[in-house]
Each structure stands twice: as structure tokens, then as C-alpha cells.
Amino acid sequence: MVPIKGEVIIFKHKNFRGHHRHIINKEENLNHSEDNSLNDEVSSLRIISGTWEFCKHKQGGAPYKKKLGPGAYPWVVDEGIQNDQISSLRETSIPW
């Protein structure tokens, strides 16, 4: 059993609209061949638990400086994250 350190929901469009996906603990590559939904397409997010790091590239490459905790983030740009520029994410206690 893998303990849940964090949970986040990522959304394709601003204000929690469009296609969405639940992430538990981390996603090393949103462009993975098994499920490439939402790679470079995230505009809003809702953090259920944990403190999260978001990155421009797979496996933690080019992380954004600001880490985010529980709450609703209707527009990632307001948090210093470029729109449609997330390829990996993790709860900060989980190693890459």
C-alpha cells in the first residue's frame, strides 16, 4: 500500500473548467504514452492535500519557484506558473 501524501486536481481551463485529472503524490510525466492528457494544458487547479511543486518539464525539470498548499487556484498565472506549461508535479515530500 502506498500512503497518500498529497492529492491535487488539475484542470484544462481557467476557473476549474474542462477536462480534469486527479493526481495522487506525483506525476513524473503528463505526456506519458499511457495517458498523455493535460500535458502543457493546465490552467487551474485545486489542491486537496499536501504541498505541491509544479514543473515545466518531465521528472521535475525546470520547477516553478512557488510551491502551493491546499486551496483553489482558478488561474495558475496568478501563482507564477505559466499557463499551459506544466509537464510534471509532485507533493514535495515525495522524491522524483
Image: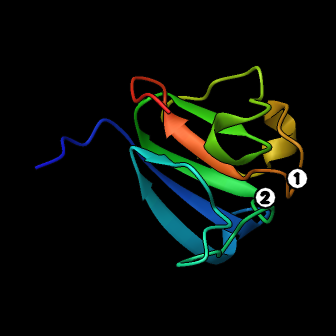
Residue depicted at x 72% and y 39%:
55
- Does residue 23 appear to the left or right of 85 in the view shown? left
Q: Is residue 30 above or below residue 65?
A: below
Q: What separation in Å lies between label 2 and label 1 (alpha carbons)?
A: 5 Å
Q: Amino acid at mark 1?
A: Asn
Q: Quadrant of residue 72?
A: top right
Q: Which one is earlier in the sequence, the residue at label 2 or at label 1? A: 2
The mark total stands at: 2
Residue at which label 1 appears = 83
Q: Specify the label residue 5 is tagged with.
A: none
Determine the secondary structure under disc 2. loop
Circle 2 packing at 10 Å, graded few (<14), some (14-19), many (20+), is many
Mark 2 touches mark 1? (CB < 8 Å): yes
Q: Nearer the viewer, residue 37 or 48?
A: 37
Q: Is residue 96 above or below residue 19?
A: above
Circle 1 packing at 10 Å, graded few (<14), some (14-19), many (20+), is some
Q: Is residue 90 above or below residue 64?
A: below
* Scheme of image coloration: rainbow
Q: Position of residue 2 (x, y in %)?
A: 18, 46
Q: Position of residue 93 (x, y in %)?
A: 39, 23
Determine the secondary structure under disc 1. loop
Q: Residue furthest front?
A: 33
Residue depicted at x 71% and y 55%:
44
Q: Position of residue 50 (x, y in %)?
A: 41, 32
Residue depicted at x 60% and y 29%:
68
Q: Residue furthest left?
A: 1
Q: Quadrant of residue 40?
A: bottom right
Q: Amino acid at mark 2?
A: Ser
Q: Specify the label residue 43 is tagged with.
A: 2
- Does residue 56 appear to the left or right of 96 in the view shown? right
Residue depicted at x 30% and y 35%:
5
